Amino acid sequence: MADDAEKPPEGKTRSTFSKAMRLRKGPEFQAVFSRRISVSDKSLVVYALANGLTHCRLGLSISKKTTKTAPERNRWKRVLREAFRLDQGHYPMALDLVVLVRMKHAGKMQDVRQALLKQVERVAKRVQSRKDPLNTPPAEKPEEPPP
């Protein structure tokens, strides 16, 4: 019976933001930044990398330079995570996304949601236009043993 409670109603999908949907480690962020595929507007900068999975993953980078106080940074994180969660089925392809914030205040949820969706669609077009089919980061050199 517990399994029935976890299933979404017939015809509806469940929108969650699990650990599998997040970029959590430094090398994951570095891989996205190293490809230098980005788009921006007055409020957000979105970096992207095709991930070869069936879903998008989100990483957030909100600096103290842009938003001075922790409550402002936390609000941005909450609003961006919620916007991502609500629109994850509308993204055109499976990407690793890193979102940077340019504005001090998050504003209305609907405005942030529209801005994020628009930027993800724009960056997806750029990722698809690259020649590398999976747009994977360059292979790292193996470490050489010390002499």
Image (cartoon, grey):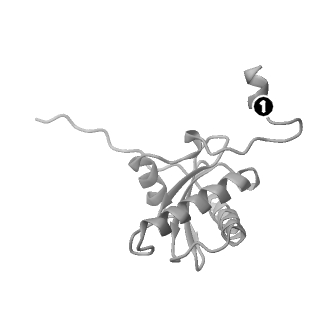
Residue 82 at what x, y percent from top left?
65, 56
Q: Nearer the viewer, residue 124 or 143?
A: 124
Residue 128 visible in the displayed image: no
Q: Secondary structure at mark 1?
A: loop
Is 61 on the left-hand or right-hand side of 134? left
How far across and down, in percent of the image, does residue 25 sit?
A: 42, 46
Task: Tell me which residue sits at (58%, 72%) in the image.
Answer: 106
Give the residue at the far bottom of this rendering: 42
Tally of numbered tags: 1
* Residue marked by disc 1: 7
Quadrant in the rendering for residue 81: bottom right
42 vs 143, left or right, is right
Say which amino acid is labelled 1.
Answer: Lys
Q: Residue 85 versus residue 1: which sits nearer the camera?
A: 1
Q: Is residue 133 visible?
A: yes
Name the residue: 45% across, 73% down. 67
Residue 11 screen position, x and y as percent = 89, 39
Residue in view at x 54 percent, y 64 percent: 75
Q: Quadrant of residue 83?
A: bottom right
**How dense is the environment of label 1, judged by Cα within 10 Å: few (below 14), some, or many (20 and up)?**
few
